[in-house]
Image: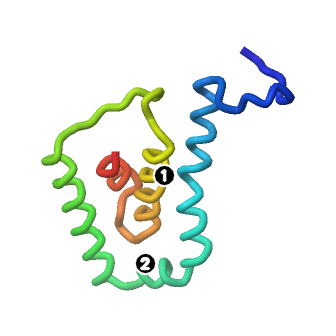
């Protein structure tokens, strides 16, 4: 249902709440990406660092699998969950760390 922006109820619908959650989750990656560009580029050029990140990703996925599954309904996701997922996404900026690996482990 369309609502005029002057009604000032930004969290009234599930889609609006999801939009705010997506924006909040991306803030951490934007900040780290902006301020740590040189560090991230250096990590991409070093083979030993890349090997370590591949090992880290594999370990992270194994630990997440052993820890068990957790399911959340969209309505149950809190701001803390969104921030935690966003901080997990920061790891995806590093070399050989998959984008979904830290997110799956974080959730």
For this rendering, which residue is in front, 32 or 37? 32
Mark 2: few, some, or many residues within 10 Å (few <14, many ≥20)?
some
Q: Would you place residue 25 above or below residue 20 in this image?
A: below
Q: Which residue is mark 1?
A: 83
* Image-based side of 43 in relation to 3, left or right: left
The x and y percentages for residue 62 are 17, 54
The x and y percentages for residue 24 are 58, 50
For the N terminus, which image quadrant? top right
The x and y percentages for residue 81 are 43, 45
* Image-based side of 9 in relation to 52, left or right: right
Q: Residue at x 23, y 54 (%)?
A: 61
Q: Residue at x 25, y 67 (%)?
A: 56
Q: Residue at x 30, y 71 (%)?
A: 53
Q: Which residue is mark 2?
A: 44
For this rendering, which residue is in front, 7 or 107? 7
For this rendering, which residue is in front, 32 or 17? 17
Q: Would you place residue 28 above or below residue 13 in this image?
A: below
- All told, the count of numbered labels is 2
Q: Would you place residue 45 above or below residue 74 in this image?
A: below
- Mark 2 or mark 1: which is in front? 1
Question: Rounded to the nearest whole Å, what is the CA distance between mark 2 and mark 1?
Answer: 26 Å
Q: Residue at x 34, y 51 (%)?
A: 106
Residue 91 location, quadrant:
bottom left
* Image-based side of 29 in relation to 97, left or right: right
Secondary structure beneath dot 2 equals helix
* Image-based side of 104 in relation to 17, left or right: left
Secondary structure beneath dot 1 equals helix
Residue 71 location, quadrant:
top left
For the C terminus, which image quadrant? top left
For this rendering, which residue is in front, 12 or 49? 12
- Answer with mark 2 or mark 1, whichever residue precedes in sequence: 2
Q: Which residue extends farthest left?
A: 66
């Amino acid at each position: 249902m369309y609502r005029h922006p002057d009604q000032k109820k930004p969290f009234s619908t599930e889609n609006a709440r999801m939009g705010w959650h997506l924006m909040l989750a991306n803030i951490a990656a934007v900040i780290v990406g902006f301020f740590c560009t040189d560090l991230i580029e250096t990590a991409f050029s070093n083979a030993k660092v890349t090997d370590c990140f591949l090992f880290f990703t594999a370990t992270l996925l194994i630990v997440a699998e052993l820890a068990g599954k957790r399911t959340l309904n969209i309505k149950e996701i809190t701001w803390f969950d969104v921030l935690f997922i966003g901080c997990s996404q920061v790891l995806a900026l590093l070399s050989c760390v998959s984008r979904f690996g830290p997110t799956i482990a974080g959730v």
